[in-house]
Amino acid sequence: MTVPPLLDARSLDRAREALCCLPFLRGFYDSVALQPLASRQVAERPDWCRRPCSEADAEDQFRWLIRLGVLRREVDGQGLTHRVRLTPMGRQILRDWPGELPQAGLLRRLRHGLRRRWPRL
């Protein structure tokens, strides 16, 4: 599969690592690929997360996934909404994993946490 010029390998690797480190399970990503979702909906569905996720936690994860290019805000006639959708990059990453997303080990989660707080590392 060819990678479009805007989706360089480093961006894809960073996004893949994030998906393994974040609390969302495959069911969430499959659902957000079909329809826009709000953080409230995620908080109400414990089967979409590896651990309990509040509405504020879900919104924080959304912002990070938006920054990485995996999600984007839904747009309606009034402008941006509180709901998110999967981007083409997110769809491409999910095609690489036909089953459940692998869970990252401790060192990988630590590295991801550092990158998230200090993006230039």
Image (spheres, helix red, strand yellow):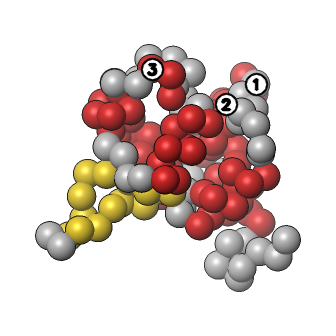
Residue depicted at 38% across the width and 53% down the height: 36
Q: Counting other residues with Cα less than 10 Å from the Cα at mark 3, is it few (<14), some (14-19), or many (20 or more)?
A: some
Along the line of sight, which residue is nearer the eye, 17 or 70? 70
Determine whether the residue tagged by mark 1 lies in a helix, strand or loop.
Answer: loop
Determine whether the residue tagged by mark 3 lies in a helix, strand or loop.
Answer: helix
What is the spatial separation of the Cα atoms under label 1 and label 2, in whole angstroms?
A: 6 Å
Q: Quadrant of residue 102?
A: top right
Residue depicted at 85% across the width and 71% down the height: 1
Give the residue pinned by disc 3: 46
Q: Earlier in the sequence, mark 2 or mark 3?
A: 3
Q: Give, as a three-letter code, the residue at label 3.
A: Pro
Image position, residue 113 (x, y; %): 58, 35
Q: In which quarter of the image is residue 116?
A: top right
Residue positioned most to the left: 78
Badge nearest the viewer, 2 or 3: 3
Give the residue pinned by disc 1: 105
